[in-house]
Amino acid sequence: MDNYKPEILNKICYAELVYERINKKLDIKLSKEKIEALIFTIIKETKASEFKKIGKNIYISNKERNIRLTINSYTNRIITADKLSKNKLKRRLR
């Protein structure tokens, strides 16, 4: 199993539009600095076993915070953050 965590923590970057997307998807209203701090904390707290590479993306699932991050594995750029929710999963399966 590859350990993506150290490289992501050292090289994570953000596109300008991602801040608005994260605020919207997580239903929060944080500044850019606070979003970056939150994302860094989530990555740092999450066990390496919860990092899954599928295609060009790495998905980081933090069940304690109920958040999944999507990061481009080539650029280490955060793409989005989603709430982990059983209801959401049920809706997708219908």
Image: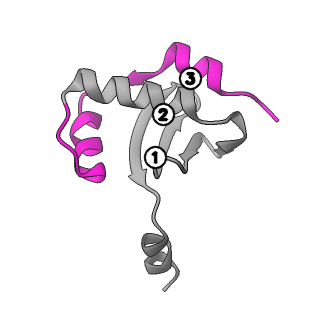
Q: Is residue 59 magenta?
A: no
Q: Is residue 5 visible?
A: yes
Which badge, 1 or 3, is on the more N-terminal residue? 3
Q: What amino acid does circle 2 point to?
A: Ile
| Pointer 3 local density, CA inside 10 Å: few below 14, some 14–19, many at least 20 | many
Q: In this picture, which residue range is highlighted in magenta?
A: 1-30
User: How far apart are labels 2 and 1 at the CA level?
Assistant: 8 Å
> What residue is shown at x 62% (from left), y 18% (from top)?
7
Mark 2 in CB contact with mark 1 (< 8 angstroms): yes
* Residue in view at x 69 percent, y 34 percent: 48
Q: Is residue 91 left or right of residue 27?
A: right
- Mark 2 neighbour density, 10 Å: few (under 14) some (14–19) many (20 or more): some
Report the residue marked by disc 1. 65
Query: Residue lying farthest right?
Result: 1
In the picture, the disc for residue 8 is: 3
Q: Residue at x 59, y 36 (%)?
A: 46
Other-residue count near label 1 (Cα within 10 Å), few / some / many at <14 / 14–19 / ≥20: few
